[in-house]
Image (cartoon, grey):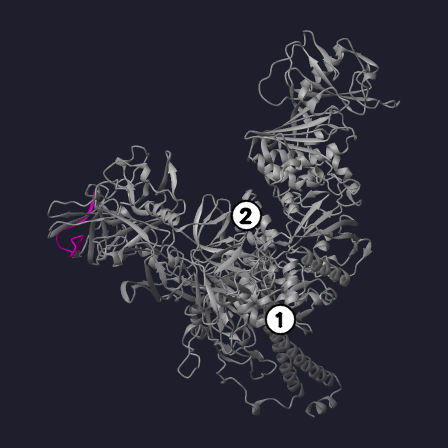
Amino acid sequence: MASRGSGKWALVEHRHHSRASRVYRFQILLPNGTSTGLTLKDPGEEMPLHDFLNHIRTELENVPMDGGERRGIDWSGDVYLEDLLDRKIDKKVQFSDFATKNTNILRLQDGEGFVRTFENMWDLTPPTELLQELPAEYSTESALADLVDNSLQALWSNDKKDRKLIRITIDQEKIVIFDTGRGMDGSDENSISKWGTIGSSNHRVFRAKGIGGEAPYLVPFFGMFGYGGTIASMHLGRRAIVSSKTKESRKVFTLHLSREALLEKSSSKLSWKTAGGIRDPSKEELTLSPHQSFTQVEIQGLNRYLGAAKLQRFLKDIYFPYIQYDEDNGSMNTRRLVQFEVNGVDLAEILENEVTITNLHSCAGPDFILDVTFSCTSTTSANSQAHARVKCVYFPIVKGKESIDSILEMLRENASGVKENFDKFSRVSIRRLGRLLPDARWGPLPFMEPKQSKGKKAELLKRCCKRVKCFVETDAGFHPTLSKTDLAQHDLFTKALRCLDGSSRSDSSVEDVNVDVHRVGRSLSCTQLEKQYHNWINNMHVKYDVEIDGGDNDHTVIINPSNKERLGISEDVEVIRVYTSVSRKGKTWKRGDHLKIQPGVVARMKSNFHSLKSIFYATLEYVVGEGLAGDICAQMNLFSRSIECSDNQGCLLEEGPDSMRLNIQESVSFPISMIDNDKCHTMEDDSWRQIRRKKKEKAPACIEILRNLQGNDLAIERGLPIEQVIMAGYKNPHEFIAVILPQPATTCSTSLLDKRYILKDDEIEMEMEINHLPGSKDHLRANRIYRKLKKPSSRDSINGLYIFQLSEVSSIFTKSGVYQFIFSVRCKDSSIIKHETEITVRPNSNTRCWQLSSVADCSADNAVVDIRLGIPVRCLAARSHDLYGNGIPFLDVHKAVITILDGDDFLAQVEDIEVELSSDSLTLNIRDFLFKTSKLDIIRPKYEAMLKISLSDNEFSHPCPCKVMPGFPSTINMDMSLAWEKNLTPGEVIDDALLEVFDHCGNHVEEGTELIVRIIGLSFVDKHGPVRKVNSEGFVDLRGLLRVINGFGSQACLKIFRHKKEIFARTFQIAIRNLKAVKVPQSCQAGTLLENIIFEVSDSDGLIDESIHGPLHTLSIRSNELKLVEGAQYAFERGRCIVSHVPVPREPGRVTFVAYHTHFSDLETTIQIPVYTLDLVPVKGENESEPICSYPTSSGSSQNTIPPSQLVLSQSNSLAANIMGKFSDEIREIDAEICSQEVLIKAFDSRKRALENDIVDLQDEISHTAGSASGAKELTRHKIEENVGTAAAVLCSRQWFRDDVVGIVALLGTVADRKMSMMLSVYLGEDNMLAVVCKTLAAANYFEKYDADGSVDVHFGIHQEAANLGVPIRKRFPIICLDAIRPYTGGLHLHTKQKPLALPFPHSKGFKGFAVNMINLSPESLKISTKNGYGLRETLFYRLFGELQVYETRDDMWQAIPHLKNGAVSLDGGIIKGDGLLILGYSDPEVTFPVVPRAALDVEEDDSEYVCTRIKTMHAQMDVVKTLENRIKAAEEQRQKLVMERNEKKRKFDEISEVLSQPSGSGDHQLYQ
């Protein structure tokens, strides 16, 4: 950048000479107070001003301007540009005058005026990641110190001849911080915007230069985080203006910060822009900085004001080495590295700060100094090396007083806010790079603590070690906290410093830190460090500790006093000496001396220290010193009794059971040094008596309560009422003001307040107590409603007022009775002064209202009276009270009329009711009356009405709310049409069974009334049992809930009971149906088939019932002769069923079979058919025309049969023909039977295939539906029901879930995949999977009870339900009670719906999760909780699984064994239970957790009953298929036997045929053979 004398235009430092593409960036400051950016690429060497202005106008049009209305720019006038050297550009813009590296700032002028501030001039947008590092805690002092840090760092780079000044000006409105550092301008490298941009400070790059060097490491490269400017200034105030100038720039650049503006611009885009400006430097600024570079930060709208004196002491402590540097060995003078000023005061002249006071009281002897180097190679450490100087300074005891106590006294006098005492005094303070870390007030470092041992030397060393303070100087290798008030506690070097003792450290995290300790150039080991430190302590004690003169020889020794804190001695002091006199300054101070103690002396009053503000008069009682005679006396105190205390309130030397005891009571202790400082003098008796007389005259004598008539000088707002009797509701007083008057004063109850007589003593507290006594003054029943203790205050220039604000008390003067106002004070001589005032409050009859109750004691507040029709009201208690609940007595009344109203509508009334009054006349009891009305449906369903009482003395009560309930169920209406009765059929569901229930007055009964429905010949479709409730319209709705189960032609019955009383009964006739066979043959041949037998079902009119149709209507045949057709079912179609074929037995006779409806067995018909066979008939001659055989008319007729003796056996041909015919007939019979079996097999197979197709369709349907949680649970429920004889099966089959019975373990959770379900179910085992879960032990006890001999009562509970099912429970079963489980009490992940347990993640390979968290709970299960609010996961599943871990493979599980707590499972079959217990082998559990994707858990579960029905249907069809398979197998076997028999017959037939085919003779012989 050119110098001031250069002809160049821009304030830039370098020029860009590259031949590459040139980009010029400009910041244009506009005359309307805004600014805009402009970027030009390769604009050439020059550009006419008009074209340049056009570029600016185009940029303004493209970029919308923020804010409100602004004046326009006069582009048509005299428009020109100015650079920062005030050079005018009015013709051409020469680009050679501007740099390409930096942003060039130009001002545009239009002749309309000049502005100094420009909006959005500076961009302060920070890096996003730095916003996450902002300090969480930031105090006003820390913020101010951050700004001073910036100033100190800025001027540290000044030349030696340049002035180094930091000047701070503070008042109530603003803070101004001025420094003469190098300053800032508008260039990119040194832009003022970096001051306000988080993370862009130039000082951060110098951080590494602060590591190493020589102590005290005065290199103020404090920059750590880069947010000291903006964050600190906005913490201090609402607005900030930063002004800065460099040596090279002629102008002062300004940056304007506003908290509101920054907050408005803090959007998600994090674009922070703020206003700025350019101005000329002021004369004062150039005077303060002769080298003409500076920075000034002005903060306005302060959030908190720091007093100038406090700020001076604070900054002097923080930057003490930079203000006064005393360690220059080459010079004996103190050097001033930086000049600090606060409000014109040079901080080098401040002596009241803690560091200066501490240095003044340090020992003149040598200090114990260690040089420590810390090095670390760990990757977790931010730096690899750090250095520290540890300087231990001895603070001796001087004239019997600890120097540290003297330091603390001076700090208290200076109001420094130090709350430490000798024992809790900070023994370590730390500076980093010379800057004090104010919160680093550590206890002693380990090497400073003496080892525990006994003996006088050890006690002496222990005491002397407490006189050492360690000052630690560190370099930049140590990391501070974000607010730079302490060292970062988690930094390795900080931990190593805390463990500094040269030996093994207790913190294992710093084992990688190497600590090298040197003293005077020599390395020290642990033993050497300890030895040299103890030697230094002993030397300092011998040379510099100064004892004081002890008390007189006659003293009392108290060993281990119990009241050490009250005595003001350290906890380690085991012995004290109590003197009655002490010699000091050539004078003996003895017990009983009267003392006059000057202001400024620090006194210990009870447990607190107080600096006396006025002269204190006291009587010396005892002198107490620490230790035994001859020991180092740490301190000696004078115990004195105030002149205002009585003798019995002072110190008492009492003899205890084991040793003497000093009971201090109200005495005050003073350090003996006040005698040395001439702050204490003895008094003559006359002077003492005179002071006592004056004190007595001013002593409290009485308490007076100020009322409004005395408040001419006071603004008493609604004080204590003047009247003694008031009405309830009197305006609540806002405040009471009381004063204490001395003896000379007179009461001011009737006169104006005399301010002269008001006692003013800040140490006297007054207590006010307000009691309420209901009724008479019965103090035993008094209720305290307020109690407060107050100190005196002032108002309207009147002091000594005790003001009790009653804004927090709201019940005064509302309840009738007596209010007591008791004011009391305890004087310093322990006497108590009291003042008591009573106010009587009467009930307010102007606000009279009524209250009713259905009990004699009407104590409840406006309880709604419940009345039920048909039940007498035994007692209705009425009470009259005012607005505040105070009872108003009734007059003498005898009768009452009670009316019930609904608005203006009359509902019911009872007249001439006898009444009686209570003994106190406050309660009116109306007894034994009864209401009747039929109009309650008007006020249904809430039954809310108003009850009004009219009394004989013309007193009318206000209507009171009541509830008039209908009577109990009395009559039931059921609209049953004749057509409906005739059409009842077995299996039919009744769709219109609606019962209308009335009470005895004709009102519908109330909703929820329970009735017992008993049914015969009917069954409930649902599983809710016989107890049914009346709905909101007064009906018991049984529509679609009753199924007819009795057969055709029978009856069904419906009865309604309330408790055990029958109130309704109705009998129904079930329709009559007949089954008959059509086209049955009169007889049939044995071995043949009965074909196409038609059966019809007809009604009572003989018409075919076409409703007998569908899969539920089939025909079965039962017969002893027709075994092959039993079990077969034939479908009805529109009332008809066709049996295609029935095989007839081979034996003649009579066949009887019964055809019946499969499901309604009472619908049957019996059929008998004669069966005949073919027999041989006589053989005629050749010329006879009669047939060889014929069919007889009856199988029993044998009149035409030829006996054997008449057969023609002589003819071989005839015999052969007979034999061949017989074989042929037998073969035909067998063929017929084979055919019959094949037909039967075909029918069975056809039926089987149809059922199998239906089963496949059902499986697909169930599989699709079971994808939901309800479907999957139904599959699991069915598996549970198959475990016959278990409690779980009974619960699922009978739905026997009662109150507080949650369910079965297997049904209370789901998992996401099948492997997980298998392994978790195997881990739990069948008993746990089928365990019953209850909420309470009471619910568990309902499952079973026991006989006197301890055996289970099988007629109770679940055993009774199991007996009803016919499957008694023969084994034990577990029940889990949720309330009895010790729940998981850790955290939960509440951001997910499942709310898994927050268990520690093991970080093991293959870890899938904790089993307890892999159980998914449905929305209903998530709502289940115990009485203490714990859910199923925290109780049930944590009890079953604990912290069971789930892994992918067995190998992963084995590797994780060291991390297991409650075992583990792997998805490939591995199980570890507890310590060392492995489960081997393989098995598939029958009952597993339902497998449901987690997304399906939120779906509404409406399909469970449907899935259950379809599953049962599928299993019924599978049973039929098995039956058909068995019958097909039997038919196949029978057919095979018939085939073998036929083949044998055929073989013999063929053999006979072959014989007959041989020549005559041999064939006959062979045939006879």
Q: Are marks 2 and 1 in contact (CB under 8 Å)?
A: no
Q: Is residue 1224 above or below residue 1000?
A: below
- Asked if the stretch drawn in magenta spans residue 917, the answer is yes
Q: Is residue 789 above or below residue 1436?
A: above
Q: Is residue 1557 left or right of residue 812?
A: right
Q: Residue furthest front?
A: 586
**Which image quadrant: the C terminus?**
bottom right
Indicate the quadrant where residue 1541 lies: bottom right
Indicate the quadrant where residue 257 lies: top right
- Asked if the stretch drawn in magenta spans residue 1344, the answer is no
Q: Position of residue 1452 (x, y in %)?
A: 73, 64
Magenta stretch: dominant secondary structure: strand
Q: How many marks?
A: 2
| Residue 100 in sight from this viewpoint | yes
Q: Position of residue 706 (x, y in %)?
A: 29, 40
Q: Nearer the viewer, residue 45 or 972?
A: 45
Q: Position of residue 1121 (x, y in %)?
A: 51, 78
Magenta residues span 905-925
Mark 2 vs mark 1, foreground winner is: 2
Q: Is residue 1177 above or below residue 15?
A: below
Q: Which residue is mark 1?
A: 1238
Q: Position of residue 1037 (x, y in %)?
A: 36, 55
For label 2, the SS is: loop
Q: Nearer the viewer, residue 157 or 1367?
A: 157
| Residue 1314 in sight from this viewpoint | no
Going by the numbered disc 1, the residue's amino acid type is Glu
Q: Is residue 483 above or below residue 1053?
A: above
Q: Which residue is mark 2?
A: 677
For the point 13% across and 50% down, which residue is it?
Answer: 896
For the point 43% across and 58% down, which residue is it?
Answer: 665
For the point 71% across and 58% down, which residue is it?
Answer: 539
Query: Label 2 vs label 1: CA separation?
Result: 135 Å
